[in-house]
Amino acid sequence: MVSPPFENNLIYALDADRSDELASFRDRFTFPTRKGNDCVYLCGNSLGLMPKNVVNMFQQSIQDWSQYAVDGHFKAHNAWLNFHNFLRDTSAEMVGAKSEEVILMNTLSVNIHLMMASFYRPTGKRTKIIMEAGAFPTDRFAVMSQIQWHGLNPHEHLIELEPRAGEFNLRTEDILQAIQDAGEELALVFFSGIQYYSGQLFEMERITQAGHAVGALVGFDLAHAVGNVQVHLHNWDADFAVWCNYKYMNGGPGIVGGAYVHERFAYRPDIPRLAGWFGNKMETRFLSNVDFDPMKGAEGWMLSEVPILTSAALLASLDIFVEAGFENLCRKRESLTNYLEFLILELNDPSIQIISPPEARGAQLSLYFHWDGKAVYDKLISKNIYVDYRDPNVIRVAPAPLYNSYHDAFRFVQTLKECLA
Ligand SMILES: *Cc1c(COP(=O)(O)O)cnc(C)c1O
């Protein structure tokens, strides 16, 4: 893995790929083409590429279904009844949790609601929620609708934190201060792990401590963090978290999401929740006249069976993470993203500002354009570069260490240079 001083030339980029122990994982994925042209794919923050072994996994699932029908719950290659458990250990490792604290279920937005049903319970003065301003739309909609659903006005009870004037990122000290200021009115801190627009990695541990210090609960949306950076939910003492598995996790569009509940809650059957049969203990799951008796651990928040056929893709993808080793991936991610940053800075173009903080980010670099970023984006697309654009004026570029190369970074910046000319 290369480290600074980097060099801005093709030979160097190709050499860096040759000395990369993870380079062969690129062949495990399929890359999209446009009109028969090969492309540079730097959109893993939005939708990860398809692992080739997904095809075998799907074939197995389909064969199990056709061969066993209802008996597949017990007889399938990976028995359906507890299929979610095959996904659980590796998922738990990815977010730094104990296995029992993690469950794969539903999708991210649904899981925000389920977690908030249990962990946002405004009472007396303690009604407010803090989140970052400009949060991902679904998070904001979910949070505002939850406040409303409790009969409160979201504009009064939601505190949205803006960066200081002229800055793109929130300072940790300002977040901690806002939490302290909200004090005993604060019911919940709900933050993203990595901000989807700026790429800022928040200091989740300190945010958690600050929330707990004023008696609030603290939850995180790890959509852009999982499979990207090291997360230690349990040790950081976070109360709950949710994520999706189709971004850096490469589980495929619409794939089942994840949720984490800290063990201090996970073993508490008295915690109110919106329940379903898969969250009930096996012994009484099929009885019609019993009270809900939750499974131990995060599993007690499950509603239904996971979508078996598509979840096979996530299993395929998790296998690759295990094989590559997440620590190795994080080392490459740092090296590759630093290289990309170096190349962009070499352009020496004052109209481009990298707003993702160098000391607190994952794979994604958000390039803020001080003029028409959308025009640059359109040109990049026409030259077979996959990146994405977010209003206002940001092109997001995310080299995923599992399948992106130093050559990809080099090609991207060469093309960007042509687009700027
Ligand atoms: C991608 C993303 C989502 C998507 O939610 P789904 O329910 O999976 O569609 C939500 N929140 C954040 C922060 C995201 O980055």
Image (tube, rainbow, N blue to C red):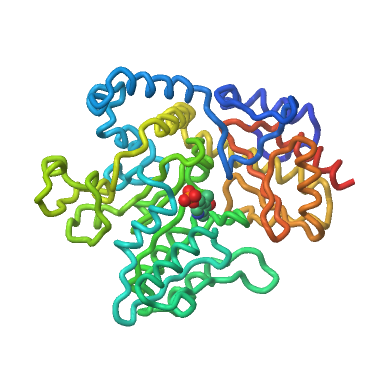
Q: As drawn, is 202 to the left or to the right of 4?
A: left
Vertical placement of residue 239 versus 175, above or below: above
Residue 237 appearing in the image:
no
Residue 380 position within the rendered picture, expressed as x and y whole percent measured from the top left = 78, 42
Q: Nearer the viewer, residue 222 or 208?
A: 222
Residue 135 appearing in the image:
yes
Q: Nearer the viewer, residue 344 or 297?
A: 297
Residue 187 position within the rendered picture, expressed as x and y whole percent measured from the top left = 36, 72
Q: Nearer the viewer, residue 21 or 81?
A: 81
Residue 181 position within the rendered picture, expressed as x and y whole percent measured from the top left = 45, 80
Vertical placement of residue 16 versus 337, above or below: above
- Location of residue 135 by image quarter: bottom right
* Residue in the picture at 30% in, 44% down: 98
Q: Nearer the viewer, residue 29 or 35?
A: 35
The N terminus, quarter of image: top right
Vertical placement of residue 274 versus 149, above or below: above
Farthest residue, direction left: 289
* Residue in the picture at 64% in, 25% down: 19
- Location of residue 404 by image quarter: top right
* Residue in the picture at 27% in, 51% down: 301
Q: As drawn, is 85 to the left or to the right of 418?
A: left
- Number of marks: 0
Farthest residue, direction bottom: 125
Residue 357 position within the rendered picture, expressed as x and y whole percent measured from the top left = 63, 56
* Residue in the picture at 54% in, 30% down: 50
